[in-house]
Image (tube, rainbow, N blue to C red):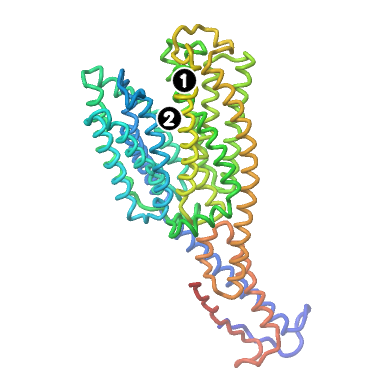
Amino acid sequence: MLPLEKAPATGGAAGGPPHCKVVALASEARDADHADDADDECARDEELLHPAGSEALDRRTALALGVAAFGFYSSIYFIKVCVFAARWHGATWHGVDLKTALAIGQSTGYLVGKVPAALLTPKLRRSQLLGAVLGVLWCAGSLIFALGALPTPLSVPCLFLASAALASAWSLLMRFIEGRARTDAIVALVSLSWIGVSGVVKSVGAELVLRGLTERAMVCTCASFGVVSGTICAVAMATRPPPSAADEAARGARREMRSIRREGLLLLTRHGLGIALTTAAYSLCGTVRVFRDFFLPELFAEVGVHGHPAAFALSEGAIALLVIATIGSFARIESNWLALNVILATAMMGVLLAFCASILWRARAIGGLPWVTLVGAGIFLMYMPIGCVLYDRLLAAAREQLTTTLLSVLSDAATTACAAALLIYKEFGWAATRGTGATGEGVTGEGATGEGGEVSAFFAAASTAVCAISALLLLGATVAFNRSVSAALGRRLSARVRSSVVGTTDAPSLILSVGGEQCAADGAHAAAPDAERTAAAAPSAEPPGGPWVLHRTAPATPTSKV
């Protein structure tokens, strides 16, 4: 009860009848009480989301998780790349050069493995992730070890099966990382393994062979090291705490999919156009990236930097620093909608950079080394943010509380299919036209002026066309994603407003689940004093103690929606 002093029955100071004055004073007191209650509730919610010391704890957790994830994926590279650190001179597989057969076997194995990865990985509970990661790691490591120990006819089947197992490694890794306020920073650290670890593994393998190991013994050694180090890092990832309440408030919950058919198709229905356009651009640029990786020595030879080993380190090191700094900077953007658009804008700038570099090189305006480096930088600026952090920000902006792994697997599958087709074409359709340029022999410095040879001419034409098409696709994806996110938020906001009207939504859970949409709950709470004021002003039975004694009743407890 809120007691008020009884006003005199007649007369009063200027400004209105005494009854109106008392009602006004009562309304002001009630509004002040509501404001105090709201402040207390906001303080409790803030303490719940950001307890004392949580910022430092989240920072330490993100750093430890990033280091463990980087170590795990680097171990994966030791398993899958060590095969290509060997030269396999003179070895064949059913009449095909063994290294060529191994490359095709790895690409097709990855493509086949994306099917179970798409069907199973999104449905795993968090408690099942460690077992799945260790199963993939040990299965692939055992098969690569068998490749080094068994006769040559079994080499390609072993690599095919190992690649099929490793196809789900990245999506399983992302299940540990996604849905955190610092996911972008963690992925920036992990992305270093995408760019730099492959060369490290090849260098280690070559050094082991120089020290007296056979190529097969080198493969067994690298695979064993990858299994041991990967196991340690996987356990370290699993022991990190799951996303906190503050993480879920910032990015939304990342729960597993109970039904790929129902929830996955619903997700694709809501954001399908943007996902399709982004996947098309991602696959095209991924194919250019694969071509550049396979033919980087030939490209350097044809553009006039043959015989300069430092060119590899200069080019790839600069690209790695640029990509890591770019992805890491996304973590400073708190608004998921803004981050989504910044990522797409960065991807568009990347493909435009590669497009302009190829145009300038074909016009003989820049040299060969800057051209190869700028194209690589532009492609990676598109490829890495799209593949690593775009979908996490998309689902966070749309408040979709599902894992991102299904979208990542679908994009990777499309890219793998394009890369496999390119590799098959390169080995069987284009082999007759490679000529001297593909071997890197007898090439002089004329490539620096923009002429080059077969490989560089093909790469320039392909990168120009692919980047122009990708820029248009990304522009369309930006428009489509903004529309789908706005529609998703509109559906959720209207549903919350309807629920709050009938009293079926709990306010704290509304703030946690909707985040940026808590304005609907605030409006519902703000309307409550007005309703009470109207009821107080309406004629009613006189309560005990006189007409100016007001009674406050506790607000009805809203029921939870089941």
Number of marks drawn: 2
Residue, disc 1: 431
- Residue 359, above or below 31: above
Q: Quadrant of residue 209?
A: top left
x 62%, y 24%: residue: 356
Position of residue 65 measured from the top left corner of the image (x, y, whole percent): 36, 44
Give the crowd class for mark 2: few <14, some 14-19, many >=20 residues within 10 Å.
Answer: some
Choose between 241 and 20: the one closer to the eye: 241
Give the crowd class for mark 1: few <14, some 14-19, many >=20 residues within 10 Å.
Answer: few
Which label was assigned to residue 287?
none
Quadrant in which the N terminus is drawn: bottom right
| Res 56 seen here | no
Tag nearer the camera, 1 or 2:
1
x 23%, y 29%: residue: 151
Q: Helix or strand or loop: what does disc 1 sit on?
A: helix
Position of residue 435 measured from the top left corner of the image (x, y, whole percent): 48, 13
Q: Going by the image, does 117 lie left or right of 452?
A: left
- Residue 314, above or below 228: above
Which label was assigned to residue 195?
2
x 45%, y 45%: residue: 409
The residue most toward the front is 95
Position of residue 120 measured from the top left corner of the image (x, y, whole percent): 39, 52
